[in-house]
Image (cartoon, helix red, strand yellow):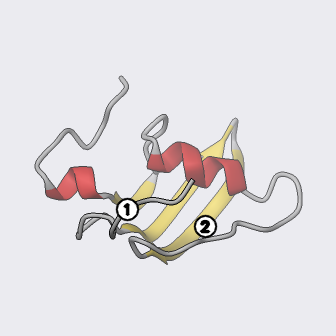
Amino acid sequence: MQGEGRPPAGHDIEFKQVTFSYLDKPVLHDLNLSMPAGSFTALVGPSGSGKSMVLRLIARFYDPEQGTVHTARDRRGGSARLLP
């Protein structure tokens, strides 16, 4: 299925110096990542390297221990945290 037009501006996703551990195991350390709106981003790596965790942080299932995850929702003034 082909979409119409371009995605709305300002829907970039950006990780700035994100650190996260899961069950006391370091998963991400000082991650800097920019995913511009309208682009394709592939997360590639071995099992346990943090690929799924990046998606969970974007979805706000978890909050980073350090650093920030910026999404379009943050810029619109919405809640930076969706789940308790």
- Give the amino acid type for the residue marked by disc 1 in the picture: Glu
Badge nearest the viewer, 1 or 2: 1
Q: Nearer the viewer, residue 78 or 8?
A: 8
For residue 4, which numbered disc appears in the image?
A: 1
Q: Nearer the viewer, residue 7 or 78?
A: 7
Q: Is residue 74 above or below residue 62?
A: below
- Residue ID at (88%, 62%): 46
- Residue ID at (70%, 66%): 43
Q: Nearer the viewer, residue 61 or 41?
A: 41
Residue lying farthest left?
Answer: 77
Residue 65 at x, y = what percent?
46, 51
The residue labelled by disc 2 is: 29
- Residue ID at (54%, 72%): 30
Please tell me which of labels 1 and 2 falls first in the chain. 1
- Give the amino acid type for the residue marked by disc 2 in the picture: His
Q: Is residue 25 above or below residue 38?
A: above
Residue lying farthest top?
Answer: 84
> At numbered mark 2, what does the secondary structure look like: helix, strand or loop?
strand
- Tell me the quarter of the picture where residue 37 sits: bottom left
| Image quadrant where one finds the C terminus | top left
Q: Is residue 34 above or below residue 56?
A: below
- Residue ID at (43%, 43%): 63
- Tell me the quarter of the picture where residue 3 sits: bottom left
Residue 41 at x, y = what percent?
60, 71
